[in-house]
Image (cartoon, rainbow, N blue to C red):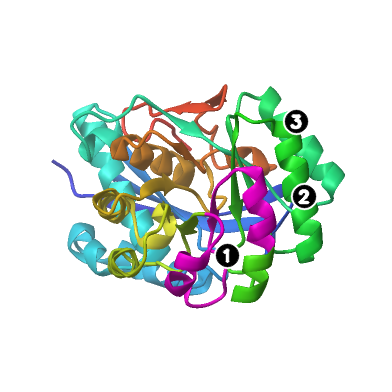
């Protein structure tokens, strides 16, 4: 077995249109591909930190990856990393190992991973008319779960947008909200009281602080997302309150192994585990798809984000009628 060689490949991917949330407006995604090569096989990882979400910015992640690439033994250096840097390195090594074994990456984390996973559509900021148009398009593309971004508009307008989304979707498709910690407790109660009339599966991160304290009074179920950036955070918050869902981003939490562990904690507490991306490139999305397949949860995951990009590092795993196959070997794609 030959020594493992590391290459770092920076990239910038423009979005087709700005993604507006309560926390940020994103115009492009900038990151670094990590390629680990040995015996003629290449494993791929991706570091695409998102400002306001990731523990480190891109410059810090790049410096960390350069140190790791120069280390004599990458496998010894990898576990001590965190965030996107760890996700990229651990992900590349896991992909390399799965390709060597000729199996999908998901099979490294589960004996019987799902062959495909269901994805939700994301409807971002915009007017009521734009929300209606986006919901119609999502239904036409075969999505049965829609996540509506809220919190960037005035509360009254958000109420109108939620009502419009449900009117277009009808009674069957699931509707989730994602507020990205937009509101104080009083505003969250006002908006979610209105939302409760429109059959909301859950609202992710409605309040700016004391999320666990808000859960008992919330008019709709509450999802945990950016308040938990580590597996320990997930465990502590699940002990503190009864969350309906735990949203796990492999990029943010530090890689596929930690993401799977966080999803196991969610299942132990009776919460639905959902895997999402941070509008990653195709490599990051593929890793997230395999994490979702390994978790095995019968729910829709936030993985249909490649269509938001005007360019990508590779042809992404295809979304067909709202589902994505977890193909192999490894992550199933090559930049």
Label at residue 170 = none
Percent across and percent down for residue 161 are 77, 50
- What is the quadrant of the N terminus in the image? top left
Look at mark 2 in the image and give the residue it sits on: 161
Q: Which residues are magenta?
A: 191-220
Of marks 1 and 2, which one's residue comes earlier in the chain?
Answer: 2
Residue at horizontal 31%, vertical 53%?
Answer: 266
Camera-nearest label, 3 or 1: 1
Label at residue 136 = 3
Residue at horizontal 51%, vertical 72%?
Answer: 57
Q: Is residue 108 left or right of residue 86?
A: left
Cα separation, mark 3 vs mark 2, equals 14 Å
Look at mark 1 in the image and give the residue it sits on: 206
- Report crowding for label 1: few under 14, some 14 to 19, many 20 or more residues within 10 A (C-alpha): many
Camera-nearest label, 3 or 2: 2
Magenta includes 184? no
- Report crowding for label 3: few under 14, some 14 to 19, many 20 or more residues within 10 A (C-alpha): some
Percent across and percent down for residue 24 are 67, 66
Q: Nearer the viewer, residue 194 or 25?
A: 194
């Amino acid at each position: 077995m030959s020594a493992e060689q590391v290459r770092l490949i920076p990239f910038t991917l423009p979005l087709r249109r700005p993604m507006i949330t309560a926390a940020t407006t994103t115009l492009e995604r900038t990151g670094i591909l990590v390629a680990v090569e040995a015996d003629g096989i290449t494993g791929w990882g991706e570091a695409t930190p998102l400002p306001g979400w990731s523990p480190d910015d891109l410059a810090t992640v790049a410096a960390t990856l350069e140190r790791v690439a120069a280390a004599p033994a990458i496998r010894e250096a990898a576990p001590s990393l965190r965030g996107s840097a760890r996700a990229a390195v651990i992900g590349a090594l896991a992909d390399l190992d799965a390709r060597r074994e000729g199996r999908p990456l998901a099979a490294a984390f589960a004996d019987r991973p799902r062959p495909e996973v269901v994805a939700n559509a994301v409807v971002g900021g915009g007017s009521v008319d734009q929300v209606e148009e986006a919901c119609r398009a999502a239904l036409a593309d075969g999505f049965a779960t829609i996540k509506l971004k809220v919190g960037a508009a005035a509360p009254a307008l958000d109420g109108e947008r939620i009502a419009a989304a449900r009117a277009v979707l009808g009674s069957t498709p699931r509707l989730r909200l994602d507020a990205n910690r937009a509101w104080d407790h009083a505003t969250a109660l006002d908006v979610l009281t209105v939302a409760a009339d429109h059959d909301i599966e859950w609202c992710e991160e409605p309040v700016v602080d004391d999320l666990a304290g808000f859960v008992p009074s919330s008019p709709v179920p509450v999802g945990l997302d950016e308040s938990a950036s580590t597996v320990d955070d997930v465990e502590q918050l699940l002990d503190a309150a009864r969350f309906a869902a735990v949203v796990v981003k492999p990029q943010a939490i530090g890689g596929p192994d930690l993401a799977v562990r966080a999803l196991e904690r969610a299942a132990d507490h009776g919460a639905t585990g959902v895997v999402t991306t941070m509008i990653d490139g195709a490599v990051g999305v593929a890793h997230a798809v395999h994490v979702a397949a390994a978790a095995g949860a019968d729910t829709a995951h936030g993985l249909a984000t490649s269509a938001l990009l005007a360019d990508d590092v590779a042809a992404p795993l295809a979304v067909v009628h709202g589902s994505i196959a977890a193909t192999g070997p490894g992550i199933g794609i090559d930049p």
